[in-house]
Amino acid sequence: MEIKYWSDIACPFCYIGSNRMKRAMKEIGIYDDTQLEFKSFELDPTIPKETTKGYINHFTQGNRALEAQAKDQMAKDDELPMAINRVVPTNTVDAHRLIKLAESKENPVLTEKVIKRFYQVYFNDGQSIADHAILLATATEVGLDKNEVSQVLNSDDYHQAVLDDENEAQRLGIHAAPYFVINNKYAISGAQPYEAFVKALKQIQSEEQA
């Protein structure tokens, strides 16, 4: 089975949805044998790399009635603690470029470590995912080469790869994330309940083996 999914580091539902998908894959025993590809999807590529706006305000666009709901539902029952009040809403393109660097190593375990740690930096650590010093420290912490990370951050390396993912999403009519495409013919949109991911994967597995 092959699964590719469009996601953004700044998207809580991407964090939740991808975690549920990976858990579902492990439950039915296909995680180790499945090609899982992260596809870049910037929710807002125009957002600056420095901001003073708080995340809840950024996420709810000033609608205070949505704030309690947002705080309550973020990662509920998913064992993904989120310090929402500490999140720094910034541009994520450099994080996406470093994920592409990780993917170039053809080491799925390394790529997964980078993605997971970037989500933690954004949603738990209260640090800017656009800050090059933080990106450098985080990426090298999980196994990327310091010199290669610096090279990427000080250039536009892998930016076209990020744009290619986003252009592919546009061609496929994908306008929101997370969005999962399985075996290039089945699709799952959004952070569906965990049970829904399990059910869908089992059904697809059965159809593909028929």
Image (cartoon, grey):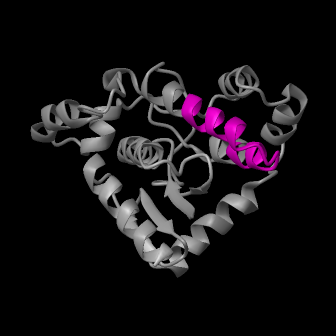
Residue 62 is left or right of residue 130, and the answer is left
Where does the N terminus fall, quadrant-wise?
bottom right
Q: Looking at the image, is 83 positioned above or below residue 192?
A: above
Residue 99 is left or right of residue 104, and the answer is left
Over which residues does the magenta segment extend? 99-118
Residue 199 at x, y percent in the picture: 30, 59
Q: Residue at x 79, y 48 (%)?
A: 106
Q: Quadrant of residue 128?
A: top right
Q: Is-magenta flag for residue 30? A: no
Q: Is-magenta flag for residue 100? A: yes
Residue 62 at x, y percent in the picture: 21, 41
- Looking at the image, the residue that sits furthest to the front is 210
Residue 148 is left or right of residue 48, and the answer is right
- Looking at the image, the residue that sits furthest to the left is 65
Residue 169 at x, y percent in the picture: 53, 71
Q: Is residue 165 visible?
A: yes
Q: Main secondary structure of the magenta part?
A: helix
Q: Quadrant of residue 116?
A: top right
Q: Residue at x 34, y 53 (%)?
A: 198
